[in-house]
Amino acid sequence: MEGALDTNRKKAIEIKGLGKKYESFNDGESQYVLRDINIDVMENEFVCVLGPSGCGKSTLLNLISGYIKPSDGEIDIFGEKVTKASGRAGMVFQEHALMPWLTVKKNIMMGPKLHHKSKEECEKIAKKYIDMVGLGGIEDYYPRQLSGGMAQRVGIARALANEPKIILMDEPLGALDAMTRENMRRELLKIFQKTQITIFFITHSVQEAVYLADRVIVLKNAAVDCDVKIELDRPRDMKSPDFAKYIEYFEKRLGDIPLTSD
Ligand SMILES: Nc1ncnc2c1ncn2[C@@H]1O[C@H](COP(=O)(O)OP(=O)(O)OP(=O)(O)O)[C@@H](O)[C@H]1O
Protein backbone atom coordinates (compact mmCIF):
# COMPACT_ATOMS: atom_id res chain seq x y z
CA MET A 1 0.00 0.00 0.00
CA GLU A 2 1.30 3.43 -0.88
CA GLY A 3 2.70 5.31 2.06
CA ALA A 4 2.94 2.20 4.26
CA LEU A 5 6.04 2.16 6.43
CA ASP A 6 8.32 -0.68 5.35
CA THR A 7 11.07 -1.10 7.92
CA ASN A 8 13.00 -3.51 5.65
CA ARG A 9 13.56 -0.82 3.04
CA LYS A 10 17.24 -0.01 2.56
CA LYS A 11 18.78 3.42 2.23
CA ALA A 12 19.50 3.91 -1.46
CA ILE A 13 21.25 7.27 -1.08
CA GLU A 14 22.63 8.64 2.18
CA ILE A 15 23.95 12.18 2.10
CA LYS A 16 25.83 13.10 5.27
CA GLY A 17 27.06 16.56 6.19
CA LEU A 18 27.68 17.30 2.53
CA GLY A 19 29.30 20.57 1.54
CA LYS A 20 30.61 21.85 -1.78
CA LYS A 21 32.48 25.05 -2.41
CA TYR A 22 33.62 26.49 -5.70
CA GLU A 23 36.00 29.31 -6.48
CA SER A 24 33.92 32.31 -7.45
CA PHE A 25 34.20 33.30 -11.13
CA ASN A 26 34.39 36.96 -10.03
CA ASP A 27 37.03 37.22 -7.29
CA GLY A 28 38.49 33.69 -7.03
CA GLU A 29 37.29 33.38 -3.40
CA SER A 30 35.85 30.01 -2.36
CA GLN A 31 32.13 29.99 -1.71
CA TYR A 32 29.83 27.25 -0.50
CA VAL A 33 27.06 26.38 -2.99
CA LEU A 34 25.91 23.51 -0.74
CA ARG A 35 26.41 23.41 3.01
CA ASP A 36 25.70 20.66 5.56
CA ILE A 37 23.23 18.75 3.41
CA ASN A 38 21.72 15.66 5.08
CA ILE A 39 19.27 13.60 3.02
CA ASP A 40 18.30 9.92 3.12
CA VAL A 41 16.55 8.44 0.10
CA MET A 42 15.04 5.00 0.64
CA GLU A 43 14.98 2.33 -2.06
CA ASN A 44 12.01 2.64 -4.42
CA GLU A 45 11.38 6.18 -3.27
CA PHE A 46 10.67 9.00 -5.72
CA VAL A 47 12.27 12.19 -4.43
CA CYS A 48 11.98 15.52 -6.23
CA VAL A 49 14.28 18.45 -5.56
CA LEU A 50 12.98 21.95 -6.16
CA GLY A 51 14.94 25.14 -5.93
CA PRO A 52 15.72 28.43 -7.59
CA SER A 53 18.20 28.63 -10.41
CA GLY A 54 21.77 28.42 -9.13
CA CYS A 55 20.91 26.91 -5.73
CA GLY A 56 23.10 23.86 -6.35
CA LYS A 57 20.69 21.21 -7.67
CA SER A 58 22.88 20.01 -10.53
CA THR A 59 25.92 20.18 -8.27
CA LEU A 60 24.12 17.84 -5.87
CA LEU A 61 23.38 15.36 -8.70
CA ASN A 62 26.98 15.50 -9.90
CA LEU A 63 28.16 14.78 -6.36
CA ILE A 64 25.79 11.79 -6.01
CA SER A 65 26.94 10.39 -9.35
CA GLY A 66 30.58 10.88 -8.33
CA TYR A 67 31.44 13.20 -11.25
CA ILE A 68 32.68 15.79 -8.75
CA LYS A 69 34.02 15.44 -5.20
CA PRO A 70 32.53 17.00 -2.07
CA SER A 71 34.41 19.61 -0.04
CA ASP A 72 32.90 18.22 3.20
CA GLY A 73 30.92 15.15 4.22
CA GLU A 74 30.14 12.08 2.15
CA ILE A 75 27.53 10.25 0.10
CA ASP A 76 26.82 6.53 0.34
CA ILE A 77 24.94 4.53 -2.27
CA PHE A 78 23.47 1.38 -0.78
CA GLY A 79 25.97 1.69 2.07
CA GLU A 80 29.03 2.20 -0.11
CA LYS A 81 30.84 5.53 -0.18
CA VAL A 82 30.86 7.33 -3.53
CA THR A 83 34.47 8.02 -4.44
CA LYS A 84 34.33 8.21 -8.23
CA ALA A 85 31.93 8.10 -11.16
CA SER A 86 31.02 4.42 -11.18
CA GLY A 87 27.77 4.40 -13.13
CA ARG A 88 25.97 2.83 -10.15
CA ALA A 89 23.27 5.44 -10.68
CA GLY A 90 21.84 6.07 -14.16
CA MET A 91 21.59 9.65 -15.36
CA VAL A 92 18.96 11.35 -17.53
CA PHE A 93 19.45 14.99 -18.53
CA GLN A 94 17.25 17.67 -20.06
CA GLU A 95 19.33 17.36 -23.21
CA HIS A 96 18.96 13.69 -23.98
CA ALA A 97 22.47 13.45 -25.49
CA LEU A 98 21.68 10.54 -27.80
CA MET A 99 24.34 9.37 -30.23
CA PRO A 100 23.10 10.82 -33.56
CA TRP A 101 24.73 8.11 -35.67
CA LEU A 102 23.04 5.25 -33.80
CA THR A 103 19.44 4.09 -34.14
CA VAL A 104 17.04 4.15 -31.19
CA LYS A 105 17.74 0.47 -30.51
CA LYS A 106 21.50 0.86 -30.75
CA ASN A 107 21.45 3.89 -28.44
CA ILE A 108 19.59 1.79 -25.87
CA MET A 109 21.92 -1.19 -26.35
CA MET A 110 25.03 0.93 -25.76
CA GLY A 111 25.22 0.41 -21.98
CA PRO A 112 24.68 -3.38 -21.99
CA LYS A 113 27.22 -3.64 -24.82
CA LEU A 114 29.81 -1.70 -22.79
CA HIS A 115 29.14 -4.16 -19.97
CA HIS A 116 30.12 -6.97 -22.36
CA LYS A 117 26.67 -8.57 -22.51
CA SER A 118 26.14 -10.98 -25.40
CA LYS A 119 24.38 -9.76 -28.56
CA GLU A 120 21.26 -11.79 -27.65
CA GLU A 121 21.18 -10.32 -24.14
CA CYS A 122 21.61 -6.76 -25.49
CA GLU A 123 18.73 -7.34 -27.93
CA LYS A 124 16.56 -8.75 -25.15
CA ILE A 125 17.26 -5.83 -22.79
CA ALA A 126 16.68 -3.29 -25.58
CA LYS A 127 13.32 -4.88 -26.43
CA LYS A 128 12.25 -4.90 -22.78
CA TYR A 129 12.86 -1.16 -22.34
CA ILE A 130 11.67 -0.17 -25.82
CA ASP A 131 8.35 -1.79 -24.92
CA MET A 132 8.35 -0.28 -21.43
CA VAL A 133 8.72 3.31 -22.65
CA GLY A 134 6.39 2.79 -25.62
CA LEU A 135 8.92 3.06 -28.47
CA GLY A 136 7.81 -0.09 -30.31
CA GLY A 137 7.84 0.48 -34.10
CA ILE A 138 10.47 3.22 -34.13
CA GLU A 139 13.48 1.26 -32.90
CA ASP A 140 15.27 1.71 -36.24
CA TYR A 141 14.80 5.49 -36.39
CA TYR A 142 17.72 7.83 -35.90
CA PRO A 143 17.59 10.60 -33.23
CA ARG A 144 17.04 13.32 -35.89
CA GLN A 145 13.77 11.60 -36.84
CA LEU A 146 12.36 11.78 -33.29
CA SER A 147 10.16 14.34 -31.54
CA GLY A 148 11.40 15.79 -28.22
CA GLY A 149 9.17 13.44 -26.23
CA MET A 150 10.31 10.37 -28.15
CA ALA A 151 13.96 11.35 -27.78
CA GLN A 152 13.51 11.75 -24.04
CA ARG A 153 11.87 8.30 -23.87
CA VAL A 154 14.97 6.91 -25.58
CA GLY A 155 17.13 8.73 -23.00
CA ILE A 156 15.13 7.13 -20.19
CA ALA A 157 15.20 3.67 -21.84
CA ARG A 158 18.96 4.02 -22.33
CA ALA A 159 19.45 4.78 -18.63
CA LEU A 160 17.15 1.89 -17.62
CA ALA A 161 18.96 -0.55 -19.94
CA ASN A 162 21.94 -0.48 -17.58
CA GLU A 163 19.51 -1.79 -14.95
CA PRO A 164 20.66 0.65 -12.26
CA LYS A 165 18.95 0.67 -8.87
CA ILE A 166 18.92 4.47 -8.86
CA ILE A 167 18.18 6.99 -11.58
CA LEU A 168 19.24 10.62 -11.22
CA MET A 169 17.24 12.96 -13.42
CA ASP A 170 18.22 16.56 -14.08
CA GLU A 171 15.13 18.36 -15.40
CA PRO A 172 14.42 15.52 -17.83
CA LEU A 173 11.07 16.94 -18.98
CA GLY A 174 12.12 20.59 -19.02
CA ALA A 175 12.49 20.89 -22.79
CA LEU A 176 9.14 19.32 -23.67
CA ASP A 177 5.91 21.06 -24.62
CA ALA A 178 3.16 21.08 -21.97
CA MET A 179 1.13 18.18 -23.35
CA THR A 180 4.09 15.88 -23.99
CA ARG A 181 5.42 16.76 -20.56
CA GLU A 182 2.14 15.70 -18.91
CA ASN A 183 2.13 12.38 -20.81
CA MET A 184 5.75 11.75 -19.87
CA ARG A 185 5.01 12.33 -16.19
CA ARG A 186 2.37 9.60 -16.32
CA GLU A 187 4.73 7.28 -18.23
CA LEU A 188 7.51 7.93 -15.75
CA LEU A 189 5.27 6.97 -12.83
CA LYS A 190 4.31 3.75 -14.63
CA ILE A 191 8.00 2.92 -15.13
CA PHE A 192 8.72 3.78 -11.50
CA GLN A 193 6.00 1.42 -10.31
CA LYS A 194 7.02 -1.38 -12.71
CA THR A 195 10.77 -1.29 -12.03
CA GLN A 196 10.91 -0.63 -8.27
CA ILE A 197 13.72 1.79 -9.04
CA THR A 198 14.75 4.76 -6.84
CA ILE A 199 14.37 8.12 -8.55
CA PHE A 200 16.08 11.39 -7.55
CA PHE A 201 14.57 14.03 -9.80
CA ILE A 202 15.32 17.71 -10.22
CA THR A 203 12.68 20.07 -11.50
CA HIS A 204 11.80 23.76 -11.62
CA SER A 205 8.09 22.96 -11.64
CA VAL A 206 6.28 22.87 -8.29
CA GLN A 207 3.33 21.09 -9.97
CA GLU A 208 5.59 18.42 -11.41
CA ALA A 209 7.26 17.78 -8.04
CA VAL A 210 3.94 17.41 -6.18
CA TYR A 211 2.49 15.25 -8.97
CA LEU A 212 5.43 12.84 -9.09
CA ALA A 213 7.18 12.61 -5.76
CA ASP A 214 6.87 10.63 -2.57
CA ARG A 215 8.91 13.44 -1.00
CA VAL A 216 9.77 16.94 -2.13
CA ILE A 217 12.93 18.65 -0.94
CA VAL A 218 13.41 22.39 -1.36
CA LEU A 219 17.00 23.60 -1.66
CA LYS A 220 17.53 27.25 -0.87
CA ASN A 221 20.47 29.38 0.25
CA ALA A 222 22.87 26.42 -0.12
CA ALA A 223 20.85 24.28 2.34
CA VAL A 224 17.79 22.04 2.64
CA ASP A 225 14.94 24.42 3.32
CA CYS A 226 12.28 21.72 3.80
CA ASP A 227 11.76 18.01 3.18
CA VAL A 228 8.08 17.09 2.90
CA LYS A 229 6.29 13.76 2.37
CA ILE A 230 3.47 14.05 -0.19
CA GLU A 231 0.54 12.23 1.38
CA LEU A 232 -1.63 11.95 -1.75
CA ASP A 233 -2.69 8.71 -3.41
CA ARG A 234 -1.67 8.13 -7.03
CA PRO A 235 -2.80 8.95 -9.67
CA ARG A 236 -2.91 12.47 -8.28
CA ASP A 237 -5.57 14.94 -9.24
CA MET A 238 -3.80 18.22 -10.00
CA LYS A 239 -7.09 20.08 -9.63
CA SER A 240 -7.91 18.80 -6.12
CA PRO A 241 -7.87 21.12 -3.10
CA ASP A 242 -5.32 18.88 -1.34
CA PHE A 243 -2.98 19.14 -4.33
CA ALA A 244 -3.42 22.91 -4.30
CA LYS A 245 -2.47 23.05 -0.61
CA TYR A 246 0.91 21.48 -1.35
CA ILE A 247 1.48 23.86 -4.26
CA GLU A 248 0.68 26.83 -2.06
CA TYR A 249 2.99 25.53 0.67
CA PHE A 250 5.99 25.08 -1.67
CA GLU A 251 5.38 28.37 -3.44
CA LYS A 252 5.48 30.08 -0.04
CA ARG A 253 8.71 28.29 0.88
CA LEU A 254 10.25 29.44 -2.36
CA GLY A 255 9.06 32.99 -1.68
CA ASP A 256 9.24 35.33 -4.59
CA ILE A 257 12.11 33.44 -6.20
CA PRO A 258 11.03 32.89 -9.80
CA LEU A 259 10.49 29.28 -10.82
CA THR A 260 8.85 28.16 -14.01
CA SER A 261 5.34 26.96 -13.39
CA ASP A 262 3.09 25.09 -15.81
N1 LIG B 1 32.67 24.49 -11.76
C1 LIG B 1 32.18 25.55 -11.13
N2 LIG B 1 33.00 26.54 -10.69
C2 LIG B 1 32.51 27.61 -10.04
N3 LIG B 1 31.18 27.79 -9.76
C3 LIG B 1 30.33 26.85 -10.19
C4 LIG B 1 30.77 25.68 -10.90
N4 LIG B 1 29.68 24.92 -11.19
C5 LIG B 1 28.61 25.58 -10.69
N5 LIG B 1 28.99 26.73 -10.10
C6 LIG B 1 28.13 27.69 -9.40
O1 LIG B 1 27.46 26.99 -8.35
C7 LIG B 1 26.12 27.43 -8.21
C8 LIG B 1 25.19 26.24 -8.30
O2 LIG B 1 25.18 25.74 -9.66
P1 LIG B 1 24.23 24.55 -10.11
O3 LIG B 1 24.43 24.35 -11.57
O4 LIG B 1 24.44 23.39 -9.22
O5 LIG B 1 22.80 25.19 -9.79
P2 LIG B 1 21.33 24.70 -10.23
O6 LIG B 1 20.50 24.84 -9.00
O7 LIG B 1 21.39 23.36 -10.86
O8 LIG B 1 20.94 25.79 -11.29
P3 LIG B 1 19.89 25.72 -12.51
O9 LIG B 1 18.56 25.47 -11.89
O10 LIG B 1 19.98 27.06 -13.15
O11 LIG B 1 20.33 24.60 -13.43
C9 LIG B 1 25.91 28.49 -9.28
O12 LIG B 1 26.07 29.75 -8.70
C10 LIG B 1 27.02 28.23 -10.29
O13 LIG B 1 27.41 29.40 -10.95
Image: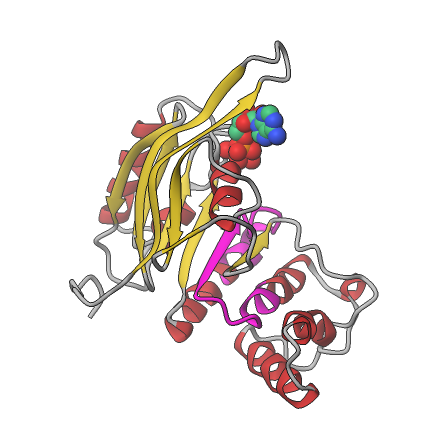
Among the 4 quarters of the image, the one containing residue 99: bottom right
| Image position of 85 with respect to 39: above or below | below
Residues 134 and 108: in front is 108
How many numbered discs sit on the rendered protein?
A: 0
Residue 42: x %, y % from top left: 29, 57
Residue 80: x %, y % from top left: 39, 56
Q: Residue at x 70, y 55 (%)?
A: 97
Residue 125 is left or right of residue 51, and the answer is right
Residue 206 in sight in this render: no
For the rendered model, the colour scheme is secondary structure
Residue 193: x %, y % from top left: 37, 71
Among the 4 quarters of the image, the one containing residue 8: bottom left
Residue 3: x %, y % from top left: 20, 61
Residue 16 is left or right of residue 178, and the answer is left
Residue 242 is left or right of residue 197, and the answer is left
Instruction: Give the residues drawn in magenta, as a range.
Output: 156-183
Residues 41 and 258: in front is 41
Magenta stretch: residue 177 in it?
yes
| Image position of 198 with respect to 134: above or below | above
Which residue is farthest right?
101
Magenta stretch: residue 52 in it?
no
